[in-house]
Image: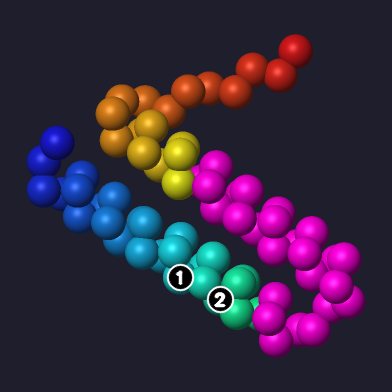
């Protein structure tokens, strides 16, 4: 892995992290009723975890392709 790839990966991770932070902050400011707020928070955490796993798998090689059949 060369320095350009690593720099690109760090910038990508910082931008995605900033997007998820703003979404997390917005969920707190919107003030949804309790069941919807909890569902939205859990959904945001699950999507964030999947993006992070996909990113980490990309560092060790090519990310796996999704086959929906």
Q: The C terminus appears in which quarter of the rendering?
A: top right
65 up-or-down from 30: above or below: above
| Residue where numbered disc 2 is placed | 22
Q: Secondary structure at mark 2?
A: helix
User: How far across and down, in percent of the image, does residue 59 sit?
Assistant: 29, 35
15 up-or-down from 56: above or below: below
Is residue 4 located in the magenta-colored stretch of the structure? Answer: no
Q: What residue is drawn where x is 84% and y is 78%?
A: 32
User: How far across and down, in percent of the image, does residue 33 sit?
Assistant: 88, 76
Q: Main secondary structure of the magenta part?
A: helix
Q: Are there few (<14), some (14-19), or many (20+) residues within 10 Å of tag 1?
A: few
Q: Nearer the viewer, residue 51 or 46?
A: 46
User: Which circle marks residue 26 in the picture?
Assistant: none
User: How far across and down, in percent of the image, does residue 68 sit?
Assistant: 71, 19
| Residue where numbered disc 1 is placed | 18
Tell me how far mark 1 sits from mark 2, CA to CA: 6 Å
Q: The N terminus appears in which quarter of the rendering?
A: top left
Q: Secondary structure at mark 1?
A: helix
Q: What residue is drawn where x is 79% and y is 70%?
A: 37
Q: What residue is drawn where x is 31% and y is 25%?
A: 61
Q: What residue is drawn where x is 61% and y is 49%?
A: 47
Q: Which residues are magenta?
A: 27-51
Mark 2 and mark 1 in contact (Cβ < 8 Å)? yes
Total tally of numbered discs in the picture: 2
Using residue 60 as the reference point, say whether residue 13 is left or right of it.
right
Kindly indicate the quadrant of the structure image that contains residue 41: bottom right
Kindly indicate the quadrant of the structure image that contains residue 23: bottom right
């Amino acid at each position: 892995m060369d320095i350009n790839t690593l720099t690109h990966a760090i910038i990508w991770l910082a931008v995605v992290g900033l997007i998820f932070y703003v979404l997390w902050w917005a969920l707190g400011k919107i003030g949804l009723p309790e069941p919807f707020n909890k569902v939205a928070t859990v959904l945001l955490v699950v999507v964030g975890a999947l993006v992070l796993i996909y990113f980490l798998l990309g560092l060790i090689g090519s990310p796996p392709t999704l086959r929906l059949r």
